[in-house]
Amino acid sequence: MDTTTAPVSLTATAKEEIKRLMAEEGFDKNQSLRIGVKGGGCSGMTYVLGFDIKTEKDESFEIDGIPVVMEKSHGIYLMGMEVDWQGGLNSRGFTFNNPNASKTCGCGTSFAV
């Protein structure tokens, strides 16, 4: 595994939630956490966060025991980004704090560079 320094960070609550998901029965241990971007959303690009198998286009790294993969080309959009988990009643889910985003939208999952 070609492990590099993590270009993104996870807050303590995000790590806790990801580890909880990975510990669930039936989780495919061959999968890593995928962080990335794709075109679309109200500001031009949308964040991708899920579990996936590493491909030849990916670089891999580890954050506190969590295997992470990301397409090499996505690094310029995500360098320095922090992923957080909000477990409250009003806002529940992962949030993205991206210093590279020139514009974000109200949903918090779409951005422009």
Image: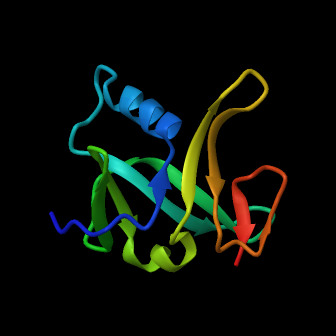
| Residue 113 locus on image (x, y percent) | 70, 78
Residue at (74, 32) in percent of width and height: 91
Q: Split into 4 quadrants, where in the image is the N terminus? A: bottom left
| Residue 40 locus on image (x, y percent) | 70, 66
Q: Nearer the viewer, residue 103 or 11?
A: 11
For residue 105, above or below residue 39: above
Residue at (48, 74) in percent of width and height: 74
Q: Nearer the viewer, residue 30 or 67?
A: 67
Q: What scheme was used to colour the molecule? A: rainbow
Q: Residue furthest front?
A: 12
Residue at (43, 38) in percent of width and height: 15
| Residue 32 locus on image (x, y percent) | 31, 48
Q: Quadrant of residue 61?
A: bottom left
For residue 84, above or below residue 71: above
Disc count in the image? Answer: 0
Residue at (48, 38) in percent of width and height: 12
The answer to whether 12 appears left or right of 110 in the picture is: left
The answer to whether 92 appears left or right of 3 in the picture is: right
For residue 45, above or below residue 83: below
Q: Nearer the viewer, residue 62 or 59?
A: 62
The answer to whether 108 appears left or right of 33 in the picture is: right
The answer to whether 103 appears left or right of 1 in the picture is: right
Q: Residue furthest left?
A: 1
